[in-house]
Image (spheres, rainbow, N blue to C red):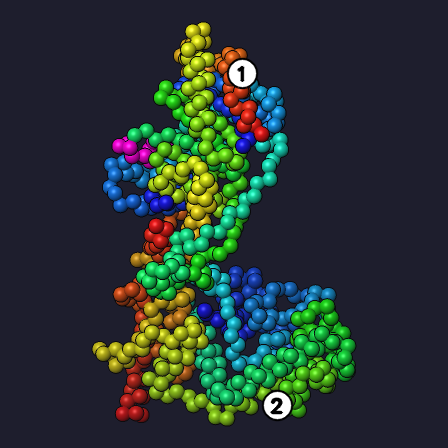
Amino acid sequence: MCRFLKHLKPLTVMTFAVFALPWRFTRGWVLCELCIYSGMAPPGLIYTSRADTGGIQETAQDDTVYVSRLYSESLLSKRNEVSLSAMCFLYQGIIAHFHKRSKTLQEFEGMLSEFGAKIGLRLLELLNFRSSISPTSASAASAANTARSNVYSSNISTPNLTKPSANSVAVRDSANLSDPQLDHSSSSMSAATPVTQEKRTSNTTANTASTVATGTTTPHNKNEYLSEHITKMKRRDLKILDILQFIHSTLWSYLFRHVSDDLVKSSERSNEFMIIDNNPILTQFINPSFNHNGSCDYFVCGIISGFLNNAGFPCDVTAHPVPQGEFERRTVFLIKFNDQVVERETLRYG
Amino acid sequence: MSIEAILIVNKSGGLIYHRDFNNKTSATHLNGNDYLILASTVHSVFAIASQVTPKALKLSPPKIDFTIPYHPYVGVPNPNSSNTSNRRTVSSQKLGSFKGPDFFNGPFTSWNKSGIRQLITDHFTMYIYQSLTGLKFVALGSSVAVLGKNAAVSNEVADNFLRKVYCVYSEYVMKDPFYSLEMPIKSKTFDQSVKSLVDNLL
Amino acid sequence: MTVYSFWIFDRHCNCVFDREWTIPSEARSGTLNSRQNDDTAKLLYGMLFSLQSITNKIADPAMGANNVQCITMGNFRVHAFKTASGLWFLLLTDFKQQNYSQVLQHLYSEVYVKYVVHNWLSPVDFAFTSDETQGQGFRKIHNRRFVAAVESVLQPMLV
């Protein structure tokens, strides 16, 4: 259903953690974040990796360069499912945390909204990037990805065939050979470099893995490879309707695997638009009661508002439950653009 | 087997949920207080039951298999039935976070090893299903389980059914951030799901 | 088809007879009216009494008397039979056989009535003074023929 955990790449998951977990854990997380940026990981730091987003892979005994899979993962989407129950329990924890820290309902809604805004801003970039990849080249890119993963698996199974080069020795010796995940990351490192040479060849022999690897390869190579597929970058949406259409279709299907149920322009006011969801997935188990009716939907509001605000459309987003017919949990996300946006639109587009 | 009432008793013996399903307005309709007493009595008797074990059992504990077999489609509409209205409801009905047409599809072990499981009286039968966390789900059935071959089967069907109530509980009650543990359940979605389970049982 | 024990409680909440077989296949094993079983007797009667009061509350009075017939536990089963005079006959068994109501009725009508009720020298009410009511009584049925008859009825079921 909702592929949150997988596709919210490391920084967003970290942000989740920073705000959702109690402070003594967040210090550890912040440390991790800083270390990732500086390219090294604190030795001996142990934490569990989340849902395949690739945390820092490490073994307690080793004391060497750690490879983060976070940056070597492709930005191209992969079909992955996260348990709805797990997501709901995590969301429940988030809500309980904010609920405890806020004194009024407005404050609570504001905190949830702010939390979602950080995700919205990242989704803006990610989804625009992904939508720029044309479908045919996208399939070529994913085919090459799977070919490379075949290389990894063959590398793991026949490690002695790999000709050690100076740096790859360092990486492999340090890596715990019995740990297949570490092997994976080191081999992904070694295969990532000679990208330019073996670009279009899906070469599954072990020799490809034996090409020169440097321990300090820039991990962005995989995505540079991906960006080579982009012939024409998607233009920034300048019209209100365009960006709202993008939210209604792409953003919603990214988050919830279906397009939103309706996109409506308010007839009364020119700056109000509504996106309607008949059954919000994240809050479907939360019992609506009169004193917090629909407050838990403010997280999705936050995602939308973060998305719009950073795309240059300053707005306020609120959630209103409007049950209709057989949809009892139908929610309307009311987007109220600032006056300057409407003015700008009428000036430019008449 | 039609269900007259469902009660949920928490681990301290307090009643956290009760619902009547029979439509007939009987003069003996119990008020809220009576149900509270009922719940606490069931809880305490449940606790005593383990101490009343006969000595023969204490000396040589028999190997009893606590696995309960799975009875398909208890409480959920059967997609294979020829009833066309059933098929439509099956496609539209989704079981929350449970994939597939039913909540579970295999046998399971009973966690109720020493407490009361079934009480048969002259006019009704009471089934108790206990979860691993000590939560007791009590169902009052209107028909008397005839002591014969089918008493065991009716016990198994009731266990399957009450386990599904437990699944629904873990969905709509446990995932609600505003629900405090061990408190009475006031959730409309939970009520609706339990009602649809009971309706589908007939 | 193993019978673990047999109990008779009267309307004063006293246990007037108990026979327990500790080794299942051995008919001569076990206890008869043992004082050590007093606690178990009280627990058992208390459980039965509570369940009966729940039953009375739930039941529709228009449908007549509603008595507990069978309680299934995790390991064993309790079969109960209540007479019009307020006597409870209890049989603790395993799961093999489902229905012991015939056995209990037979024990009441052919054994108890014959050897205790029709016996002029045996008290029918085992609480002689008011102190012995409400669970405080201690008199039991010691009638040899009664005990022998009970054992002859239940012995085939011990295995």
What residue is disc 2 on? A200
Mark 1 and mark 2 on one chain: no
**Between C68 and B192, the one nearer to me in the picture:** C68
Q: Main secondary structure of the magenta part?
A: helix
Which region shows up in magenta?
C53-63
Give the distance between the C-alpha atoms of the residues marked 1 and 2, in whole angstroms: 95 Å
What residue is disc 1 on? C148
Residue at image position (42%, 88%) is A236
Image check: A234 left or right of A43? Answer: left
Q: Amino acid at mark 2?
A: Arg
**Between B10 and C97, the one nearer to me in the picture:** C97
Residue at image position (55%, 90%) is A228
Which quadrant holds residue A291? bottom left
**Which x, y percent locates residue A327?**
31, 65
Chain containing the residue with disc 2: A
Where is the N terminus of chain B found, in terms of image quarters? top left
Q: Amino acid at mark 1?
A: Ala
Foreground: disc 1 or disc 2: 1
> Could one spot residue B45 in this view of the protein?
no
**Which x, y percent locates residue B92?**
35, 65
**Which x, y percent locates residue A160?**
77, 77
Q: Is A120 above or below relative to A230?
A: above
Tell whether label 2 touches label 1 (CB within 8 Å).
Answer: no
Q: Is residue C15 magenta?
A: no
Number of labels in the image equals 2
CA neighbours of label 1 inside 10 A, class few (<14), some (14 to 19), many (20+): few
Point out the residue furthest to the left here.
A268
Query: Disc 1 on helix, strand or loop?
Result: helix
**Between B152 and B189, the one nearer to me in the picture:** B152
